[in-house]
Image: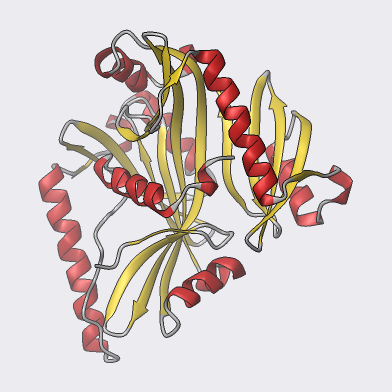
Amino acid sequence: MRRLNWNSGVLATLAVAVCAAGLHSCSTSTHDRGESAEAEEEGEENEADEADEHAEGSGEQAVELAKVPAAVRASIERITRDGKLERVTHENDEGVSVYEAEYTKGGAKCSANLTDSGDVLELECAVAASALPAAASKALMAKSPNASIKSVETVSLQLYELQLTTDGKTHAVMLTANGAAFGRGEEDEEGEEGDEADEEDEKAEHAEASGEKPIELAQVPQAVRSAIERVSKDGKVTRVTYEDDEGVSMYEVEYTQQGAECSAAITEQGEITESEHTVAASALPAAITNALATKFKGSTVAKAERVELHFFEVAVSSGAKTHGVKVFANGEIWNDEEK
């Protein structure tokens, strides 16, 4: 796992990239809110105005499920199984085509963003504030001691990390399933062998700094073991490690599944914060293949991984303002949208 060790500067850069890729609402949602119902209503009206402005600017329009591409329809039907589909919209914002399905599931309001090919970009579901993990709540309160939590959403963001070789050098790029750039590695390595060696050195340095050590599956907490069994279903666990990095306990499981190398980062309470799954270049979404052909001409894919980040989007009220904070279950704050 590398992303949960990103520094704040890299996380901030990636947060900006989420906005640019059109994957997530990046409004600061900062409203004057008093204790009165009138202030609350004003905030809701402002949010509605922002939604209308976004819809107008992006050309967002409602569409019938029967009229969306077959691949999109299949994904929507799979995601909303055991739920109720409420609305489907389509938008084309600066050339980025995105379908959004709004639905309820288990009493919760949810939404899914999908590409034209039915690939999932992002999933969101509203949850009760009590569902926020203790570590995440503690981090939020440490940052804003007098703040109160207004709303919480679980978010699953799907990305693709590629190691590309160009003119004998390799570098990393992060793309969304619709081919939009999400982030890019800062260093180029000379050749694939050198890149692999450098990656191994980084892993060794991180393991030493964080006290990472291997652990038997039978020795991990039951919540972690249950999470491992869930993600590695029909696969084979090859290694489990434990680390305590600045007081944050994390477990990582490495496993193989249908011939692919996979890994997942799991908190002590069994929450999955990140997962990786190697994919063949031929199995990459069509939009990524097209992006590689146009934006990265002459490059070949040395390695590809599907990366899923799982975090919480929390609306926090502090004083007279409400703003959004993205925080992982282990308490690591991704970004704070207050301005």
Instruction: Find residue 106 and report its image quarter.
Output: bottom right
Furthest toward the bottom, the residue is 36
- Vertical placement of residue 120 versus 133, above or below: above
**Foreground of the two, 149 or 147:** 147
Looking at the image, residue 271 sits to the left or right of residue 316; the answer is right
Q: Is residue 75 left or right of residue 179?
A: right
Q: Looking at the picture, does residue 261 appear above or below residue 111? A: above
Q: Residue at x 81, y 56 (%)?
A: 221
Q: Is residue 182 visible?
A: yes
Q: How is the image coloured?
A: secondary structure
Give whichever of 195, 334 is nearer the camera.
195
85 vs 55, left or right, is right
**Quadrant assignment for the N terminus:** top right
Which residue sits furthest right?
Answer: 218
> Could you say which is closer to the camera, residue 49 or residue 288?
288
Image position, residue 253 (x, y; %)? 71, 39
Q: Is residue 121 above or below residue 46?
A: above
Tell me where residue 111 appears, x and y as whole percent: 39, 50
**Residue 190, image quadrant:** top left
Identify the residue shown where x is 25% and y is 83%: 33
In the image, what residue occupies the spot 71% across and 58% down?
A: 268
Residue 87 visible, this angle:
no
- Number of residue marks: 0
**At which x and y percent is residue 309?**
50, 45
